[in-house]
Image (cartoon, rainbow, N blue to C red):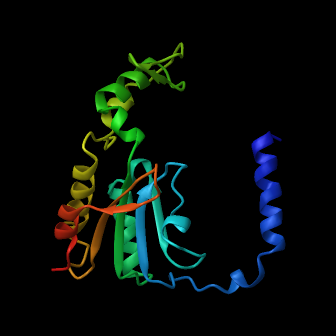
Amino acid sequence: MSEIRGEILAANQTYVDSFGEKGTLALPPARRFAILTCMDARLDPAKYAGLAEGDAHVIRNAGGRASDDAIRSLVISYKLLGTREWFVIHHTDCGMQLFDDDIIGDLLEQSLETATIDDQGWHDHGAGPGSVHGHYVKWLSFKDLAASVVEDVERIRSHPLVPGRIPIHGFIYDVKTGQLIEVSEAAKAGAPV
């Protein structure tokens, strides 16, 4: 057993021992909202949004981007589980700003091993084999943080399966302070219609 696996299982047993009444939580989120945010380990939506188990849906992916799968999850969250409000939350110092589709495509073509970055850019350390398939994926990287929030709110708002009455809020989480900063253009784009 790996060390991490053992730690996870031990932590889970501690959690099970104090699980209490959580097994009675309802399927729909109690506070009727969903958050789309980044998978970055520095972000803890439960803490920065004051969530307890059962409160909200939290959808996480690289960059907190409004990918087709994220929108699928938001639509299910609304249509089948009753959420009434959505939050798109990107963050400062995001790794998605450090590359573009060509960079990651080229790295994946060289090898499938983990790459590193320094002042001179990205470096692949694998000896191959790689895959050309990395050039066929839309990685949804970005350079402008606020613009990416607006783009995602607009993408969600314009989706044909998203009702216009759902407010969609756009924020940036500051990893240095923990503060949520509203993106005014996203607020306009996500206002109910």
Q: Residue placed farthest to the top in the image?
A: 127
Horizontal side of 173 relative to 156 (left or right) equals right
Q: What residue is shown at x 38% (from left), y 31% (from top)?
A: 134
Whole-percent x, y for residue 110 in the image: 44, 17
Q: What residue is shown at x 32% (from left), y 30% (from top)?
A: 135
Q: Quadrant of the C terminus?
A: bottom left
- Residue 151, located in which quarter of the rendered image? bottom left
Above or below 47: residue 176 = above
Whole-percent x, y for residue 136 in the image: 31, 34
Horizontal side of 1 relative to 77 (left or right) equals right
- Residue 81, located in which quarter of the rendered image? bottom left
Q: What residue is shown at x 30% (from left), y 32% (from top)?
A: 100
Residue nearest the observer in this picture, 180 or 168: 180
Residue nearest the observer in this picture, 32 or 27: 32
Above or below 55: residue 44 = above
- Residue 161, located in which quarter of the rendered image? bottom left
Whole-percent x, y for residue 106 in the image: 36, 22
Q: What residue is shown at x 28% (from left), y 41% (from top)?
A: 142
Q: Quadrant of the N terminus?
A: top right
Q: Residue placed farthest to the front in the image?
A: 177
Whole-percent x, y for residue 13 in the image: 83, 63
Residue nearest the observer in this picture, 192 or 71: 192
